[in-house]
Amino acid sequence: MEIIAFIIIILFASVLQTSTGFGFSILATPFLLLIFEPIEAIQINLILSLIISSALIMKIRKDIDFGILRRFMVGSVTGLPIGIMIFLLVEINRLKLGVSLIIIVLTIMLILKFRINQNKKKDLIVGGLSGSFTTSIGMPGPPLLLYFSGTETQKEKLRGTTLAFYLFIYFVSLIIQVTFAGTNKTIWVSSLWALPLVFVGLYLGQLLFKRINQNIFRIFTYIILLFTGIYLLIESLR
């Protein structure tokens, strides 16, 4: 059952990541935590997400907003060490609880048409939050997704800029995780077995991206965020 669950998780998360630019860590991490220890789930997610971003970067480079990308990267430098400290010091259920409440509250604000005016200072703050989310729970997506949705960013720009940022943030976060939290054979063997599923997901996700219009994309975003937030909340209370 664990093998079947692993296959389904990786395949669906890969399709979502490729078609939307943000889905892998948001969908995969909570479910991988049911199968693996926290350190294993987070590092498997980081490795596979890095592979996906690397595979897609050349195809989506024309959609990248390099100004926002640079500010995200600068902001993340502050968030990365904060995240690893949280991971090492905070009990995992408390971490899940905090993240779930943040995701749920902010998503409800977006559904109620709360809007954010994008500027350079907010880019830096969002980059910092994303950095801390990455090294603590392996999920850089929620801050970026909520920010881009609040500013009504076009789906092409959202996907291109987030994937480019992920290429940087996942690489640095993986190094920090391995250095401070260690690693093991299970992480790397499981990641290797997942590679064929990732490449199938890449192909299917590209086909899906071409068929999603902007309104459906936004609704799908809200559903994924609410699902993730509620799921993490339930898990944290067990």
Image (tube, rainbow, N blue to C red):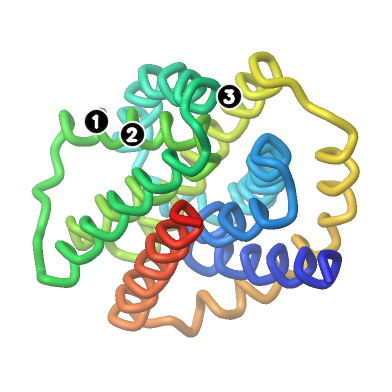
The location of residue 200, given as percent across then percent down, is 77, 70
Identity of the amino acid at label 1?
Answer: Ile
Q: Which mark is residue 172?
A: 3
Asked if marks 1 and 2 touch (Cβ < 8 Å), the reply is yes
**C-alpha gap between disc 1 and disc 3:** 18 Å
Q: Residues within 10 Å of mark 3 (few under 14, many from 20)?
A: some
Check disc 1 and report its element: helix, strand or loop: helix
Identity of the amino acid at label 2?
Answer: Leu
In the image, 34: left or right of 212?
A: right
| In the foreground, 218 or 183 | 183
Check disc 3 and report its element: helix, strand or loop: helix
Q: Residues within 10 Å of mark 2 (few under 14, many from 20)?
A: many
In the image, 221: left or right of 48?
A: left
Q: Which residue does the image show at 64% across and 51% down from the upper left?
A: 33
Q: Which residue does the image show at 9% across and 48% down from the upper left?
A: 117
Identity of the amino acid at label 3?
Answer: Val
The location of residue 185, given as percent across then percent down, is 90, 34
Q: Could you say which quadrant of the image residue 131 lies in? A: top left
**C-alpha gap between disc 1 and disc 2:** 6 Å
Q: Could you say which quadrant of the image residue 94 lies in? A: top left
Decide if residue 54 is in sight here.
Answer: no
In the image, 31: left or right of 215?
A: right
Q: Which residue does the image show at 82% across and 65% down from the upper left?
A: 2
Check disc 2 and report its element: helix, strand or loop: helix
Is the residue 95 above or below the residue 154 in the image?
Answer: above
Q: Which residue does the image show at 21% across and 57% down from the upper left?
A: 105
Q: Could you say which quadrant of the image residue 31 lies in? A: bottom right
Specify the quadrant that holds the N terminus: bottom right
The location of residue 135, given as percent across then percent down, is 52, 30
Circle 2 residue: 129
Q: Which mark is residue 125?
A: 1
| In the foreground, 190 or 219 | 190
